[in-house]
Every structure is written in C-alpha cells, then in structure tokens.
Image: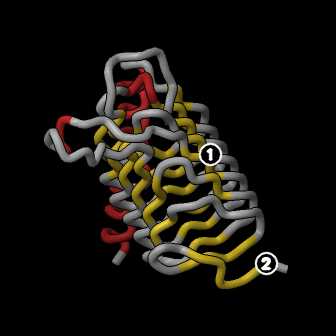
Amino acid sequence: MLVHRIGFYLRFKFANGFINSSRKLWFQLWGMKIEPDVNLSKMFVSWPHQVSIGSKSILERNINFKYDGPWLPGPRIVIGNTVFIGTNCEFNINEGIKIGDDCLIASGCKFIDHDHGIEMNQLMLSQYGARIKIIIGNDVWLGCNVIVLKGVNIGDGAIVAAGAVVTKSIPAYEIWGGVPAKKIGQRN
C-alpha cells in the first residue's frame, strides 16, 4: 500500500509538475502569454502568440486553440485569472474571444466567432461570413457541451445549462438553456 502511495505522489506531483513547467516554457517561447500558477495539460495551439492565459487558471487536456486566420499580432484569445477550462473544449476563433476572471467552462464547450457565406452563386466553402468577437464576463459558468456563437456577450454571473447553443447575448445573472438558448431562470 505504501508503494502505491509513493508511486501516486511521484507520478501526479513530481512528474506532472515537471511536464507542466516544460509545456509552459515551450508555449512561452512561441509567444503565448502565460501568467504565474497556470496549470496546462496537453493541448493543440495553432498560433501560440494569439493566446493569453491569466494567473491561477487550470486548463485540462485536449483543448484546441485554433486561431483561424492569417498571422497577425496577438493575442486574440484572452483568458482571465482563475479560469477553469475542461477537457476537449474548442476555440475556433478568427476575430477574438475574451473570457473574464473566475469563470467555469465545463468539458466539451465550443466557441466559434465566425460563419461562412451562403450566397447561391459560389461554394459556401469559399465564402466569408460575419466575424464578431465573443465576450464572456466574470464569474460565468458554462455547463458541458455548450456552444457559443459569434457576437455573443455573456454578462457577469450568468449560467448556461449543459448542451445549450448560445446565439444571442445573455444579460448578467441570468440562467439560460436550450437550443437555441433562452432564459430559464434568474440568479438571486
């Protein structure tokens, strides 16, 4: 039993700490802005200089930061302090996203700030659509598998239920859910 405890400690405290430090250094060398006490797991980042992560944030494994555009000065993906982002979240960003402080983003959430055009005389694949920044306020909780689309502003203290598709802005301290998301409650 003691051997298991020692093995657990070495694996999760020492080895993970070394790997986390190495990963942060690697991304910082490529231009990512990472504040102190950030916990980074294995992730994909297309343009590291487009990502800024605030202090004491925790990012679980398999997060995909895809900046979909040409090389431009960054960052366009800005994550505040003390933010939790769960496993398998995807940031498909062209214009930008800002996440405030103290947010909880559960596993599987997706953020897409742009569309394709839908004109009939050319392929949709080759058309550009609207591109509008996403803004998430402070102390926001997004449940599992929430999808947030272009131009959405989610106010401070709002909650979005699991599986919701957010197509329009949410005022502060409201609770929304459904497809498309609509108001289902109010925080008191």
Residue 112 is labelled as none
Residue 133, position in %: x, y? 54, 40
Q: Residue at x 76, y 63 (%)?
A: 172
Q: Quadrant of the C terminus?
A: bottom right
**Mark 1 highlights which residue?**
56
Q: CA distance from mark 1 to mark 2?
A: 26 Å
Q: Secondary structure at mark 2?
A: loop
Q: In which quadrant of the rendered view does residue 7 lie? A: bottom left
Give the amino acid at mark 1.
Lys
Residue 150, position in %: x, y? 48, 49
**Number of residues whose C-alpha sits closer than 10 Å to that of mark 1, classed few (under 14), some (14–19) or many (20 or more):** some
Q: In which quadrant of the rendered view does residue 49 lie? A: top left
**Mark 2 highlights which residue?**
187
Q: Please state if 160 lies on the left or on the right of 155 as rendered.
A: left
Give the amino acid at mark 2.
Arg
Q: Residue at x 65, y 84 (%)?
A: 184
Q: Residue at x 57, y 53 (%)?
A: 152
**Viewer-side residue, 51 vs 1:** 51
Q: Is residue 33 above or below residue 122?
A: above
Q: Is residue 137 above or below residue 32?
A: below
Q: Please state if 124 lies on the left or on the right of 61 as rendered.
A: left
Display coloring: secondary structure
Q: Is residue 72 above or below residue 176?
A: above
Residue 142 visible somewhere in the drawing: yes
Q: Is residue 126 above or below residue 57?
A: above
Residue 16 visible somewhere in the drawing: no
Q: Earlier in the sequence, mark 1 or mark 2?
A: 1
Residue furthest out toward the front: 121
Residue furthest out toward the bottom: 184
